[in-house]
Amino acid sequence: MSHMNFSGANCKNCYKCLRSCPVKAIKFKNEQAEIVEERCISCGHCLAICPQNARNIISDLSQVKKAIADGKRVIGSIAPSFAGFFRGEEGKVIAALKNMGFYEIEETAVGAEIVTELYKDYINKNSKENYITTCCPSANYLIEKYFPKLIPYIIPIVTPMTAHGKVLKNIYGKDSFTVFIGPCVAKKVEADSYSKEKGSIDAVLTFEEIEKWIEEENIDIGDLAEEKLIGRAFKTGRGYPMHGGIINAIGNLANLNSFDKLSVSGMEECIELLESMEKGNLKQVLVEISACKGSCIGGPNRIRDRKGYFERLRGVKDYIEKRESYLKESKEIINIPEDIDFHTEFKDKGILNNKPSEEELEKIMRTMGKYSLEDELNCGVCGYDTCREKAKAIYNGMAEVTMCLHYMRSKAENITNVIFENTATCIILLDGDLRIKEINPAGEEIFLVQGNNLKDKPISVLMGDEDFRYVRETEKSIIGKKIAIPQYNVVFIENIVYLPKHDIIMASMVNIMKEEKNKEELIKVKENTLNAAQEVINKQMRVAQEIASLLGETTAETKIILSKLKKVVEGEEGEIR
């Protein structure tokens, strides 16, 4: 099940998400970012950093609401980092949650206390070359998928969330509905892939989801009376979300006397350390590993944008001090049932990338416009550290050639230059003061000038500037206007456009002088043809008239003769009768 991805509607191909992804688990296809689930370590930083807010995170809120509506006992396990994100409002947030239907809210720090004791027990009973803590699910996924050789060093104990979920189910019953509340998106994946099959955690809500839910319910937490959490956890458990909190909780153990205790947070540090361990360069180390810089307090939650890291850190420290004084008065410390299994196992989920041959790699590099080392800028804009890493990603179907900004810019410039240099259309670019910035070869040929000699000179040195002034002042284009410039023996179809973003006026002018001459010649041919036809008609009329005249005379004479003959014939017939 995919718990997080990008919504296609808002993706603008800035590659900021890919640059933030430590394992490059984001695939681009048809200019759309897509998280590849089997490669993803669920740190959530790509979604938090997206400037277009093109994120889609599966929410369990509807399940929580349904559980409340169905009358189930909904139990919240709230991470101690909430004191940093909701500094000064901790008790009111607890009151709001109960107001919305939670039966009880307890601290995940209870689970942290359990994990601490189990860590100590495991280290004392198992002699290892190195030990790696398992509280951060993203760090666990990082090792399983990208450093599987280090799995033997992972302490096989569940996370504090899962541990607490098991305890809550034991206390409130298997039918209770447990909800983890914290800053971590990776917990959603953990609850679904690890805990849910064992019935530990039923739903996960982030602090951001809680805040939105409170707003939806129109609850003003300022009007609520503060409520306290059940005092089950010690100070050590509440220190888990801080950098070094886990190692401080484990303390000094005899088996760790010769070990270096390293607290690493942030993916760059984590990967660097794991690489050193994988190479065998680091031995006898106890590693507290957290994917987020500054540990859980630096989690990828939008609420953090309103509070700086050190402000959140101060909030957690203040909360620990307040709760410590409360615990001195409380003896309600949880007893861990012996029949609960808090152990887990981690599996080799190593990512296998296909490796291109050198010939295949070079072929891809050429499609990217990289023909030599000088062409390999390794700028990282696309999200990959080097051009060759990007080429390997293309080979594995994770990237596209068009993701290279310099390649696309060069390609666009080349196409533009080809058009600009070779078109028969005269193209002139002017600045806002109507001074010539560029003129193409076709324009140079028409105006009988060299472009370098015209640079920064007013357009009026070539032609009238009235149309250009009109376009600049009105910002309205002139399209398809026919103008003649007799001194250059040209007739143009003129198109002038103002480009406000660049404060540039572009003129493209098609010389139609040949067409105009052809039109004139055609008109002359037509006129000559008409004149010749008229002359023929006139001659025909004259001939017809002459023929008619001759026919008229002979016809009259014939008529007279025939009349006389008729009379003669008629006279002879009378005598016979």
Image (cartoon, rainbow, N blue to C red):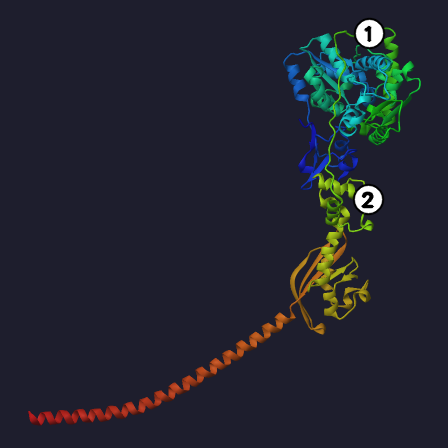
Instruction: Name the residue at 74% across, 55% down.
Output: 414
Point out the image quarter for the N terminus: top right
439 w.r.t. 524: above or below:
above
Marking on residue 570: none
Residue lying farthest to the top in this orientation? 331
Q: Nearer the viewer, mark 1 or mark 2?
A: 2
Q: Are marks 1 and 2 in contact (CB under 8 Å)?
A: no
Percent across and percent down for residue 210 are: 73, 22
What's under tag 2, amino acid-wise?
A: Cys
- Depth order, front residue of 204/324: 204
Of the numbered discs 1 and 2, the one sitting upstream in the chain is 1
Query: From where the camera sits, is residue 12 visible?
Result: no
Q: Which residue is denoted by mark 1 in the rendering?
A: 333
Query: From where the camera sits, is residue 461 visible?
Result: yes
Mark 1 vs mark 2, CA separation in Å: 55 Å
What's under tag 1, amino acid-wise?
A: Ile
329 w.r.t. 484: above or below:
above
Q: In which image quadrant can residue 128 be found?
A: top right
Q: In which image quadrant can residue 46 be found?
A: top right
Q: Secondary structure at mark 1?
A: loop
Point out the image quarter for the C terminus: bottom left
Q: Which residue is denoted by mark 2 in the rendering?
A: 379
